[in-house]
Amino acid sequence: MVQKLSAMLAFALSAICALTLRADEPKKTVANLTFAEPIAAIVYDHCLSCHRPGQSGPFSLLTYSDVSQRAETIQAVIRDGYMPPWKAVHTGIDFSNDRRLSEQAKKQLTEWIDAKCPEGDPTKTPTPPKFPDGWSLGVPDIVVRMDRPFTIPADGPDIYRSFVFPISLPEDKWVKAIELRPTARGAVHHALFFLDMDGAAREQKSLDGQPGFAGMNFLKTRGNSLERMPESMSRGLGGYVPGATPNRLPGDLARYLPKGSDIVMQTHFHPSGKPEVEQAELGIYFADRAPKQKLVAVQMPPVFGMGAGLDIPAGKSDFVMHDEYVLPIDILGFEIGGHAHYICREMTMTATQPNGKATELLRINDWDLDWQDQYLYKNPVALPKGTKLTVDITYDNSAKNPENPFSPPRDISWGRESTDEMGSITMLVLAAAENERPVLELALQDRMRDAFGNRIRSQMGRIGGLLGGGNGLDGTFVKLLDRNRDGSLQKSEIPAKFRDRLLDLMDNNNDEQIDKSEMESGRKEMERLLDRRPKGK
């Protein structure tokens, strides 16, 4: 991160110096190459989604003056491939939202800048595209806002906070896109949107006086978290990461939003060094009618790599997390994207069909936490039953990695903090035959349960007695930590290292303690996850 900021600063300084030295020099004219024609059109098509007032870009590129003053910087970031941001390597599959500049556009920009940025005839400059009210996708069908601000401190640990956006529509709707406009852009690491159909999230209580609530207990759907989580995670409505451009789902595809339901935004804040205030708005875009089929998210490894053995030794520069899955039905792939933290370096998803044909569905060779994106296939990718999907995600935990958050390097394991690691590639798919979709959904839920079980197994030794030497929570653990001897575990009694994950998984009523009934419920579900016995037996 520091290296990138330094590079950008150097680019900016070189631009200022170059323009100062050349201010009195006459501008050479390249035939048919001016800002009016065709440079403005290139900039408008590839840069304005971020580089305009009120958006994530650090400066605006709306006018000739804006662009010419940043010319040296623009040339440098284009030469280095830093801009426009697009991490997917072309592997023979085209994406409809590809922001990459063509070689011709790069050549034209370079020659225009070398010619000292001739403006041309201003009357021939195209009108910049309009972005109504600052929304990238146009005026939303509805806009909902956090009811009051949430204060983010200047420093301290990462914050995970869930906020309820009551929608309460009188009829069923189908969502084409959700666009988030955060006010604390510098502190928002990412956000995920979930559907709450029964009002459970509204009942969650804030214990610190601020809006929203900690954790993801709203996913429990009035039941045991471990049991319900695989089903609940399928209620996702998309997400937001800084630098990514929102997209509408293609064709008639849309996500279901039942009447009377709410949207919950689970937000990961990373303090930015200064106090910030978040009061985000969601712009929601609806489809005209219900889609013919339902999208399914195929995530590999499941739960962002929770149970995939993501334990990266300090100094290890080529740690690979590997996952495989054989499709139980024919599918069509529509969208794909990855997620990881700082020390990830590369990620790929490969599909090997039963006939041996192999296709790279996504390849990223220089992962960057700041540029997480969703890639829309230009044409649906058809994969038959029996296709093996393979995901490899490579991490560099060495001192040579400038993105490493620790110096000297430390062991890094799976976790929610920015300085922990995660990793997955997720593809949105349709069943080729809609009546076979439940087969895929149930198989993916089983994989998610296996991930939880694997995570529990990996933590048994570390938590030290948490599972009582067997497969469940027994009295030994409670007696060890229950300092006030009330038979329950309050938040303050749980070791900080395990506090959030235990409360997320077992605090069913969100009162920041684990009582006897929750302990017993959690014990039974952990036994199911570890033993993979059929429910009810």
Image (cartoon, rainbow, N blue to C red):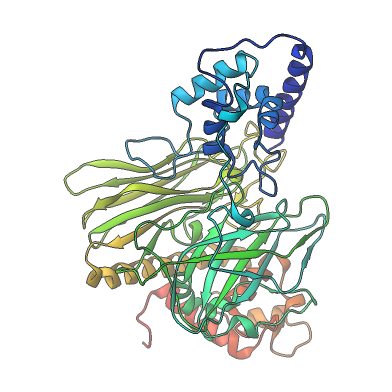
Residue at (35% x, 54% y) in the render: 334
* Residue 282 screen position, x and y as percent: 60, 65
Residue 97 location, x and y as percent?
44, 45
Image vertical order of residue 323 relative to residue 527, above or below: above
* Residue 369, image x, y percentages: 59, 45
Work out whether residue 526 or residue 420 is closer to the camera in this orientation and state it: 420
Which residue: 64% across, 75% down? 503
7 shown above or below 491:
above
User: Dividing the image into 4 quarters, which one contains the C terminus?
Assistant: bottom left
Report whether residue 85 is seen: no
Vertical comparison of 152 with 377: above or below: below
The residue that appears at 72% across and 50% down in the rendered structure is 186
Closer to the camera in the image, 520 or 176:
176
Residue lying furthest left in this view? 355
The N terminus - image quarter: top right
Nearer-the-camera pick, 262 or 117: 117
Answer with left or right where residue 410 lies relative to residue 472.
Answer: right
Name the residue furthest front.
123
Total marks placed: 0
Whether residue 93 sits left or right of residue 54 in the image: it is left
**Is 492 rendered above or below residue 356?**
below
Which quadrant of the view contains residue 504? bottom right
Picture coordinates of residue 62, whole percent (x, y)? 65, 37
| Foreground of the two, 234 or 407 | 234
Residue 63 lies in what quarter of the image?
top right
Q: Is residue 137 visible?
A: yes
